[in-house]
Amino acid sequence: MTNVPNKNTHTEQHKSTSNTEMYADDTTLHKSAKYLSTIQANLQTNLLKVHTWCKTNYIIINPIKTICMVIGSSHKLKQNCNMSLSISGNNICIVQTQKLLCLYIDNTLSWKPHIDSVCANMSSEFFLLKQIKPYLTIKM
């Protein structure tokens, strides 16, 4: 994509950087800072820039598929971690777990949702192998 907002977009108001990662049709904005209010303001500014770019290039952002995740330690997340972001007047849903490029990521980076998913898939595969075992021979 040409003229897409810079991979590292600097904002005058916050003098900080919001990183943009793109893969196929998925785009991820991420920001780290000491204060959640700084992160929120930076991301909202950059969401507006991305939205403007998309409108200029006749691309529609689906607000239903647009999500936000605040990542931190369990202790930090128990504190006030209310974040409010929006696109075109639509509030962005805050999630605790999200599948991103075939990996389940949770807001504490524990990997538990991903491990649970892999184990569930392996369990069903083992069940199928057990079901066909009587029909298999060593010569196969």
Image (cartoon, rainbow, N blue to C red):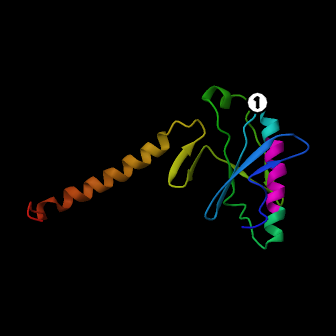
Label 1 CA crowd tier, 10 Å (few <14, some 14–19, many 20+): few
Residue 98 in the image: x percent, y percent?
A: 58, 49
Q: Is residue 37 left or right of residue 127?
A: right
Observer-nearest of 32 and 119: 32
Residue 83 placement (x, y as % from top left): 76, 42
Q: Is residue 95 above or below residue 65?
A: above
**What residue is pinned by disc 1?**
34
Q: Measuring 86% from the left and 40% from the top, which residue is drawn there?
A: 15
Could you tell me the amino acid type at mark 1?
Lys
Residue 51 in the image, given as x and y percentages of width and height = 80, 61
Q: Residue at x 20, y 60 (%)?
A: 131
Q: Quadrant of residue 31?
A: top right
Taking 63 as reference, is 19 above or below it?
above
In what quadrant of the picture does the C terminus appear?
bottom left
Whether residue 43 is in magenta: the answer is yes
Count of labels in the image: 1
Between residue 80 and residue 37, name the one nearer to us. 37
Position above or below: 6 against 69: below
- Residue situated furthest top in the rendering: 75
The residue positioned 82% from the left and 69% from the top of the image is 55
Residue 18 placement, left or right of 121: right
Which secondary structure, mark 1? loop
Q: Residue at x 84, y 70 (%)?
A: 56
- Between 33 and 2, the one lying in front of the other is 2
Question: Where is residue 115, by image quadrant?
Answer: top left
Magenta-tinted stretch: 40-51
Magenta stretch: includes residue 2: no
25 versus 15 height, above or below: below
Check the picture and name the quadrant holding the N terminus: bottom right
Q: Main secondary structure of the magenta part?
A: helix
Residue that protrudes farthest toward the right in the picture: 13
Residue 115 appears left or right of 85: left
